[in-house]
Amino acid sequence: MLDKLDISGSFIPSVGTSYFELELKAMELADAQENDIRRRFSRFVALYRLHRMRRRPLNNDDPATLSPPRTPIVLHDWTAKGVWCFEAASLRDHISAELSHVSYGFPKSLPPRNPLTNLPFTYGQLLSVRRQLCALGKTNSIIEGFYELNFKVGVYQSVYWKAIQLRAFERSYADERGDEFREKFREFFTELVYTLIKMDMRAQIDELFHWAVGRAVGMPYMQEWKGIYRQYQLTEILYKEDPCYGRMHASIQGEARILFTRKRELDELRQLKLETDSSGGEEDGEDDESLSDYEAYANLDAASAFDLGAAPS
């Protein structure tokens, strides 16, 4: 048919063309013209709907900044028949947090959701978000990695599970007053105490450091412990299946063993605990135990409390 269509799209019959061929070519031409009209009309309807949606914003302020977006990301919602407008940086951080979600220490990536409706973004909306972030120069490695995996949450979680755990740890590590940081830090001390301390002194030492995590984490001595705790968590996340894991774990225990024998710092910590108890201080909204429960700390000889053994070289 195409070789017998002129520029205007009309059919040019040749000598000897049968009636059946003429009818067939005429039907093909009519079908092509109808499809072209349908395509143009569908495009017109879509542009008209987009025009009406753009005139109907579904929100005025970004939910994170509570102010009109300065670098907006515009998303069309065909269900609500309107447009959502978000601040580029806040929407990027929101999606990154959803993908980096960790539940009880295990990566659990969540589908990125609209922060105002809590409904998952559609595939087209995610493509639009990524395209607009790239145009604004505000994309990040999380968004790009999610895009490379075709926005499949399960695949992203399985591929980037170590990175997800690492980001979650960094967030909790930066918040010393957060519940997650305190819980994990206390679990770290409990593990070390029951590994390195003599049985008759374990409960008292564990109680002392349990209190210090909530009330004295800013002390230089506790900040040294915080650095060892960071090494321990990074080793657990990045090198758990590495052949050198055992050697690295032993090195961390060796550093902890040295800190446990620092009698002067332990005395300062005990003294601060006793003063806080005597003044009726509270931790996390709960009453501390009475002073009599901690009288044993006053005469505690730090060096005699530990199975020191031979420190690793």
Image (cartoon, rainbow, N blue to C red):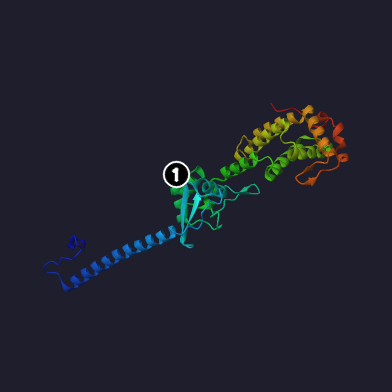
Residue pictured at 71% horizontal, 44% vertical: 183
Residue pictured at 34% horizontal, 62% vertical: 44
**Amino acid type of the residue tagged 1 in the rendering:** Leu
x, y (%) of residue 299?
87, 31
Q: Is residue 288 shown left or right of residue 253?
A: right
Please state, as top left, top right, bottom left or bottom right, where the N terminus lies in the image. bottom left
Residue at the far top: name it.
313
Which quadrant holds residue 134? top left
Q: Nearer the viewer, residue 279 or 139?
A: 279
Query: Dot 1: within a 10 Å radius of its alpha carbon, few (fewer than 14), some, or many (20 or more) residues?
Result: some
Residue under pointer 1: 136
Q: Is residue 156 shown left or right of residue 47?
A: right
- The answer to whether residue 311 is seen in the rendering is yes
x, y (%) of residue 293?
86, 40
Please state, as top left, top right, bottom left or bottom right, where the C terminus lies in the image. top right
Residue pictured at 78% horizontal, 33% vertical: 269
x, y (%) of residue 24?
22, 70
Which quadrant holds residue 171? top right
